[in-house]
Image (spheres, grey):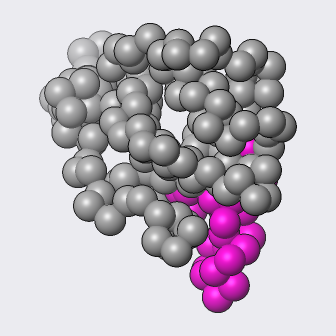
Amino acid sequence: MATPPSSRRWQAWLLGIPATLLTIALLAVAAGQAGAFAGSRPSDLGAVGGLLRPPSHTPNSVSSQANRHPDHPQRERAQIAPLRYEGSGQAAMQRLAAVLARQDRTVVVRNEPGYLHAESQTALMRFTDDLEFLLAETEGVIHLRSASRIGFGDRGVNRARIEVIRRAFDTSVEPKAGARPRPATP
């Protein structure tokens, strides 16, 4: 028995849906690889009065200073512990710079006494996140902030990345005097 023409059209249409979805997915990945989802570097990064920027207003950032912004809508979700160190704060910042230089798809873009700014990209779609670190020597900590440049959520990527950096920082050794971290490759 022959298939009616209307049924053949319906089957062709149904077969076209997966092909269309696959094409859209491939185009999105290609756009990400080309840098379409990198976003622009914020012009207001850095510390003002010992504070990094507040967390993002969307659930895509973490900050060890989130509690210093009591009315912020993402304060509780964004709160994360700072990096703790013993000894010299400047040596701790050097150690942190060396840890960041070893992270995949991460590059330190600003390294000043007491402040580091790095950019990290996700593997597939190349979303760029900004990581900031601020030395607070009187507290024996390095405050931090990690935020996605675009998008609403981050699926926990910023928090997970900071915890990987924390583990590497906590287990790393102090660099030798005068040693410099190897340059990061994007």
Q: As drawn, which residue projects farthest toward the right? A: 86
User: Which residue range is magenta in the image?
Assistant: 59-83
Q: Quadrant where the N terminus lies?
A: top left
Front residue of 158 and 8:
158
Asked whether, in this view, residue 108 is left or right of residue 100, the answer is left
- Based on the picture, tell me whether residue 79 belongs to the magenta stretch: yes
Residue 128 visible? no
Question: In x, y percent, where is residue 120?
Answer: 43, 33
**Who's the residue at 26% across and 61% down the image?**
43
**Figure quadrant of residue 8:** top left
Residue 185 visible? yes
Q: Is residue 9 above or below residue 137?
A: above
- Based on the picture, tell me whether residue 60 belongs to the magenta stretch: yes
Q: As drawn, which residue projects farthest toward the bottom? A: 71
Q: As drawn, which residue projects farthest toward the front? A: 177
**Who's the residue at 67% across and 56% down the image?**
136
Question: In x, y percent, where is residue 47?
Answer: 47, 64
Q: Quadrant where the C terminus lies?
A: top left
Front residue of 160 and 142:
142
**Figure quadrant of residue 151:** bottom left
Asked whether, in this view, residue 25 is left or right of residue 93, the answer is left
Front residue of 24 and 165:
165
